[in-house]
Image (spheres, helix red, strand yellow):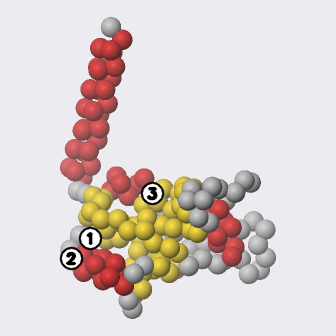
Amino acid sequence: MPRPAPGEVISVATNRKALHDYFVEDTFEAGIALTGTEIKSVRGHRVNLRDGFVQIKNGDAWLLNVHISPYDFGNRENHEPRRERRLLLHKQEIRKMLSKVSERGWTIVPLHMYLKEGRAKVEIALVRGKRLYDKRDAVAERDMDRELRRTVKEQDYE
């Protein structure tokens, strides 16, 4: 496999369900403390962020419920797929997130995992939950936008 160019970002996994279920208020880039077999699985794009969330314990941010598949060529020292992983963030970022999460209806979820200069990074977001009618409005708006683009495209061909 060819080495990435310096500064190149390689997308590993995205959490599209989070964008459907939540309003994204603020995003942060965080590093992740991984073991050797975990980073090899991440480089193989064997990550699922769908059910993941971030919890703040004792001044540290922890990534929970994110599935990183065991490395195929690992030995008995292979990692646990859903173990807690520490996120590497600045203290002021953690404090800001903690103050928002203590409010009602806010949570922190991972949106995107990627490799940046060989290191695994996670884009996490402070989010508020959508209600059912908000989701319906988003779908209706997307359909109207699609229909508008279709009619404009048809007008261009005539």
- Does 1 sit above or below residue 76? above
Q: Which corner quadrant holds the N terminus?
A: bottom right
Q: Residue 7, image x and y in percent?
A: 55, 59
Q: Nearer the viewer, residue 140 or 100?
A: 100
The residue carrying mark 3 is 15
- The percent position of residue 27, horizontal first and vertical second, equals 35, 65
Residue that lies at the very extreme toward the top in this rendered image: 158
- Mark 2 lies on residue: 103
Q: Are marks 3 and 1 in contact (CB under 8 Å)?
A: no
Task: Name the residue carrying label 1.
Answer: 106
**First reached walking from the N terminus: tag 2 or tag 3:** 3
Residue 25: which quarter of the image? bottom left
Mark 3: amino acid = Asn
Mark 3 or mark 1, which has the lower sequence index? 3
**Residue reaching furthest bottom?**
58
Q: Residue at x 50, y 81 (%)?
A: 86
**Judging from the image, what secondary structure is the residue with disc 3 in?**
loop
- Crowd around label 3: few <14 · some 14–19 · many ≥20 (10 Å): some
On screen, residue 59 versus residue 151, left or right, reads right
Q: Quadrant of residue 45?
A: bottom right
Secondary structure of the residue carrying tag 2 is loop
Q: CA distance from mark 2 to mark 1?
A: 6 Å
